Image (cartoon, grey):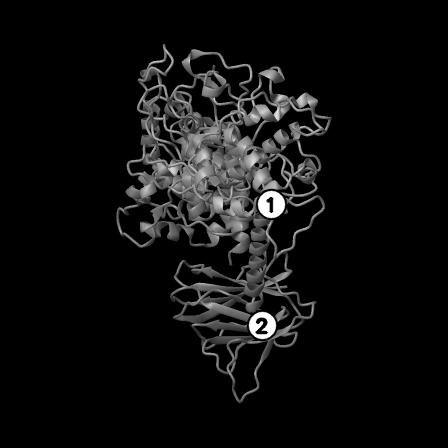
Amino acid sequence: MNTVLERPQTAASTLEDFARQHLDALVTYAIHLTGTPEEAVEYVTAGMFYARHFPPASLQRDGRAILYRAVTRAARQHQHFPPQRKGVARLFGKRPPLISLGSSAADANRINTAKRALLATEFSRRSALLLRDLAKLSYREIGVALECSPEAASRLVAAARREFGSIYRDISI
Amino acid sequence: MKCSLLTLSCALDGELSKERQAELESHLVTCERCRTGMRYLREETERISQLVKVTVPAGTATALLERAKVIASVQPASEGAVIPPKDGPTETDRRLVEPGPDPFNLMGIGSQPIEIPEPDLTSPARPEGSPAEAIPPTDAAPAVSDLELFRRVPELDLPPTPSPSAPDLAMGPLPETPGALPQDWLIAVSGTPQGTRSDTPEMATGTSGAPPQVRDGAEPAAGAVPGNDLRQGPAEESGQTPVFMPLPAAFPDDADESGPPSERMSADGAPAPDPAAFPPGESNEIPGDGWADSGPEQSTPDRVEMMQVALEESAILDSDATDSHVPPSQPAEARASIPPPPSILKAQETGWRPNADLNLGLDDITAAKPHLDALASSADPDSPPKGASFTAAGPRPTPSHFTPVRPAAAAAAGTADRAAPPPSRRASEPRRRGQESREGKPPLARGTATPRSWTKTATIAIAALAVFLIGWTLTHHATTTPTPSTHVTSPAGSKPTPVTSPKAPPSTAPAITLSGTQSFGSSGSGYQVQNARYGLHQNGTQLWVVFQLGSGSGPPHVTTGFDGGQTLYVEMQGVAAGTAVAQPPSGELVTSVQPGQVPGFSGAVYVLRLSRAAQVSGYLLPGSPTGAAGERVVLQLQ
């Protein structure tokens, strides 16, 4: 018989502390990563839901990076929370947004040249650029969030800056 | 040191070692290219860092963490958790957190409270060594789906039995004497045995194959087949230990039954017919029905109808047992000698009330079935002969096994009918073989959905699809302008449909007919054209024309369209035309840009003369290169 124990309550409290502390930055990161506040909220919720499975030791070791990892994973794999309807059913009855972020999200969602250029970049480069320049994560933390080595994270950031700058200068006039 | 963008990026982030940083600084003194690259990297870093930050209200954060189950929910989701905004409460902040899926609603049952009689756990009927403390009290109640299923089983036409308590559950009251539980109660709680309650759908539908729970600590009887409690005889009549097991969604195949056939009991307590006596291909499976087994994902109504069909099939098999084609395993006299239940005797005395609610246990139903057969064979004068057809106006053929017993007066009037021979097996054979149907429908294999449900589902799906297509067609054909998009191009090579400008009202002046119109923006206003700029992009293949607008509110509505092949009209609603704009350099695609007029149009209109036919796409960009407020109308021509 397989016995699955309930996760200790200390893990949940630690995760809650981390989540409350970095929720603004996580939502900001998700909004600029996905381009829509509704999806961003769903991805952040999915990431938090997934982060419940992280052991407390990884939370202690990696800190906020592991939350960014969970959110990035949810956005990369399009894991909405709650899950989206499948098949023809998704065409009928659009769900209202579960949680509204208010006017700040609308401001963040307003398109501009930098955001257009950002959304035109490739996902992993976009996430690396946002993690570095918006969330101010170190290369080691970016490596944790993107599940790669710090060296690969540095190359991703450099390539993302080059691509973003090229697109920005191309579309700006 | 070699020039490297990676090194520059790492230096910008402060991730280089001191030696490498000093080496790079000395390199930057001499390398103009790296200095330029470093400046670009700084600019892009600043642009990203200047993106708008989002502040999540405290209430929203709590709701989000509750939904993610990071923290325990303080307020039940079913009551609708209103997200309290921390600052600046808006209407959008007051949206409700959507409650989680209600399993009752998912099953189509509803969430009305159901009273479940509490069994006496301390009664001596409980097995020894299993104290009440060992039973989880929270899961002791039967699953609602099981109860609903059991409640709807009595749609069969059988006389009602009074049930003073718990009328919704069709379960009789608890007996006064412990250990003498009525059979209907036993079956009702057998869907969720005490202490073995499981919320899994397999357990709820009885398809998990879990062994039955035996009371009094006795081993299951030889004929006690898991999930086959409908075939199980009444405990009191057969003298066996009562067996409690999940209520099955459908009967398992006879091939699953174990033990010798003589030890298996039929519904009336007599030995069941031996499946081995059936010819190959004529067992419980109905050949040629064409319905695949859809497994346990059926809805409750399907399962109810399935049980009805299973009861009919069981009755057919029992009737087959008396036929010459199949050797009978039980004499008809022995079946007739079994006393009918009191409810049936009462029905015979008082008459039959069709479509009345039934408060009987399944054992009552199965035990009463042979007597119903006997009554039906004697009281059914409408049994059609073989090959008889039924018109729409005539009475529909009723299954002989569920033919209601007519009242005494009607039965007396139909003495001649009563003298008619009982329906032979010839009459029921086509039904069993799938040629004819129950009420004109093809018979079903066990565990399948009914064709009516499939027909309903297909009809609803087709209707929804038709409505969707009609709506989509009307929506997309109602607008003559395409969806505002930043990169919608109009093929200049193809012959576009001439579209009259929607902004031009009836006027004495001849209306301008524009073709290849595009629209973008919305209902902004308060703008004024300040200037126009021109630039080559995409290796000189595209000419971008940018109208710089002053500050205003909202994105303005812009419409572009061609008058002929080489004249492009740009209409900007809510924008005042400037006095003059800069002209494009000579030799470009656009030869001149002049303010124009369109009759009845209140906004700014600019006429662009082109040197050749071109494609145009446009979009809006907020702001200006200098950082001032405003909007930019960008037209890409190529």
Q: Which residue is drawn at 57% across and 51% down?
A: B461
Which of discs 1 and 2 lies nearer the camera? The answer is: 1
Chain letter behind tag 1? B
Residue B267 relative to residue B331: left or right: left
Res B250 seen here: yes
* Residue projecting furthest to the bottom: B508
Q: Residue at x 51, y 51 (%)?
A: A168
Q: Are discs 1 and 2 both within one chain?
A: yes
Q: Distance between the residues labelled 1 and 2?
A: 89 Å
Quadrant assignment for the C terminus of chain B: bottom right
Image mark for residue B561:
2
For mark 1, give the secondary structure.
helix
In the rendered view, tell whether residue B493 sits above or below residue A110.
below
Residue closest to the eye, B46 or B328: B328
Report the residue marked by disc 1. Answer: B416
Q: Which residue is drawn at 56% across and 52% down?
A: B460
**Residue B253, image x, y percentages:** 62, 26
In the rendered view, tell whether residue B513 sits above or below residue B483.
below
Quadrant assignment for the N terminus of chain B: top right
Q: Are marks 1 and 2 in contact (CB under 8 Å)?
A: no
**Residue B76, image x, y percentages:** 31, 38
* Residue projecting furthest to the left: B87
Classify 10 Å Cα crowding around label 2: few (below 14), some (14-19), many (20 and above). many
Res B14 seen here: no
- The quadrant in which residue B104 appears is top left
Classify 10 Å Cα crowding around label 1: few (below 14), some (14-19), many (20 and above). few
Total marks in image: 2
**Amino acid type, callout 1:** Ala
**Amino acid type, callout 2:** Gly
Residue B108 relative to residue B612: left or right: left
